[in-house]
């Protein structure tokens, strides 16, 4: 019985790590290509179309936008930090 419950706990832990990895990689790729992350919650945002700091599980994304008269809202800067270290940044 102990072996079966240990196996279930291990399987659950591996599943959670894989899901977190998938969320992190998705947001990492989007930040590297100057797009907004998906799996984050809004922190402090501005009134300029969504500039601000967004928080994920273990990482933070800073997005800077501006409003253009010609193109509308444009992303000009995205920076992703994991535990305080910059891992991805894009600038237009």
Image (tube, rainbow, N blue to C red):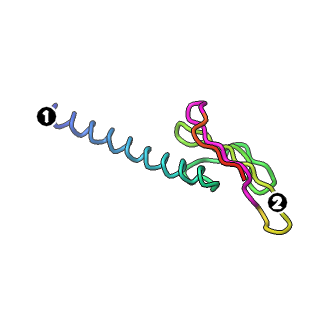
The answer to whether mark 2 and mark 1 are in CB contact below 8 A is no
Residue drawn at the location 59% of the way across and 31% of the way down: 85
Which residue range is magenta in the image? 74-85
- Name the residue at the right extreme: 69
Instruction: Give residue 5's position: percent from left, percent from top.
Output: 21, 36
Q: Is residue 72 left or right of residue 29?
A: right
Q: Identify the disc placed on residue 67.
A: 2
User: Is residue 17 rendered to the left or right of residue 71?
Assistant: left
Which residue sits at x=56%, y=31%?
A: 83
Report the Cα–Cα distance between label 2 and label 1.
Answer: 61 Å
In the rendered image, which residue does mark 1 sit on? 1
**Considering only order in the chain, which callout, 1 or 2, is on the residue closer to the N terminus?**
1
Q: Residues within 10 Å of mark 2 (few under 14, many from 20)?
A: few
Establish if 36 lies above or below 80.
Answer: below
Q: Main secondary structure of the magenta part?
A: strand
Q: Is residue 77 magenta?
A: yes
Where does residue 55 sit, x and y in percent of width and height?
Answer: 61, 42
Secondary structure under the numbered disc 1 in the rendered image = loop
Q: Which mark is residue 40?
A: none
Q: Is residue 82 magenta?
A: yes
Number of residues whose C-alpha sits closer than 10 Å to that of mark 1, classed few (under 14), some (14–19) or many (20 or more):
few
């Amino acid at each position: 019985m102990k072996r079966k419950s240990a196996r279930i706990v291990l399987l659950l832990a591996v599943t959670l790590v894989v899901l977190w990895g998938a969320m992190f990689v998705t947001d990492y790729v989007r930040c590297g290509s100057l797009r907004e992350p998906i799996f984050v919650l809004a922190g402090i945002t501005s009134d300029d179309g969504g500039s601000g700091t967004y928080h994920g599980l273990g990482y933070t994304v800073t997005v800077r936008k501006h409003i253009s008269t010609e193109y509308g809202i444009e992303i000009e800067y995205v920076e992703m930090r994991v535990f305080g270290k910059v891992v991805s940044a894009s600038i237009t």
